[in-house]
Image: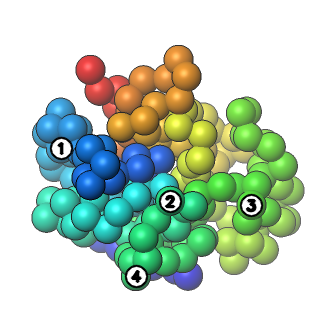
Amino acid sequence: MIDIVQARTIVVLADCHIHPSKGIDWPQAALDAFAGADLFVTLGDMGERAGLDTLARLAPIVGVRGRDDEDDPRTAARLRVLEVAGLRLGCVFDPIEVGAALQIEPLICASAEAMECLFEAPLDALLWASTHKPSLERVAGCLHVNPGSVTLPGKDAPASFAKLTVATGAIEAEIVRLQ
């Protein structure tokens, strides 16, 4: 699935497991830090639809499905490609599960040919999740971004999300750590 989107500032989220009915909801510090987002990209395990609805009041949402997600058309796909300012961003929850990686921690992607087949063309960035730990690296010209988790960070990991700034032909990324 390829979506053409207009956005300059993209907040990338994953592994948040938002379940207001169980006491896990967006921390106010996170909602404050999301200010200025043009688009939210969710990479799965977001939890209840109510968490997506909260984000939708701030900016549009698109994403992929994880294992802990209620059915929602905004995040129904297992794999998604976003075209933003002429750049291609591949989105997956578990890159091993969809054939995009051979291992995680550290991420080792499948062959260039396999990735191109999976995403229908080369990517400028691969947005991935499922570890609750943030990572950001550039490998062979492709930016690899795992936002970590705002609400349930992995062992020794900070509460975090990723922020992408996109312009024609360029993408910058940072991991934003919450206090």
Residue under numbered circle 4: 73
**2 or 4: mark nearer the eye:** 2
State how far apart marks 2 and 4 are (Cα). 15 Å
State how far apart marks 3 and 4 are (Cα). 21 Å
Residue under numbered circle 2: 68
Please state, as top left, top right, bottom left or bottom right, where the C terminus lies in the image.
top left
Residue under numbered circle 3: 97
* Residues marked 2 and 4 touching at CB (< 8 Å): no
Indicate the amino acid at tag 2: Asp
**2 or 3: mark nearer the eye:** 2
Residue under numbered circle 1: 31
Mark closest to the chain's N terminus, 2 or 4? 2
Indicate the secondary structure of the residue bearing disc 1: helix
Mark closest to the chain's N terminus, 1 or 4? 1
Mark closest to the chain's N terminus, 3 or 4? 4
Indicate the secondary structure of the residue bearing disc 2: loop
Q: Where 90 sits versus 148, above or below?
A: below
Q: Where 39 sits versus 144, above or below?
A: below
Q: Residue at x 31, y 49 (%)?
A: 22
* Residues marked 1 and 4 touching at CB (< 8 Å): no
Indicate the secondary structure of the residue bearing disc 4: helix
State how far apart marks 2 and 3 are (Cα). 15 Å
Indicate the amino acid at tag 3: Glu
Indicate the amino acid at tag 4: Pro
Percent position (x, y) of residue 6?
30, 70
Question: Mark 4, residues whose alpha carbon is within 10 Å: few (<14), some, or many (≥20)?
Answer: few
Q: In the image, is 80 to the left or to the right of 11?
A: right
Mark closest to the chain's N terminus, 2 or 3? 2
**1 or 2: mark nearer the eye:** 2
Indicate the amino acid at tag 1: Leu
Residue 151 seen in this snapshot: yes
Query: In the displayed image of the protein, which residue is found farthest to the top?
Result: 156
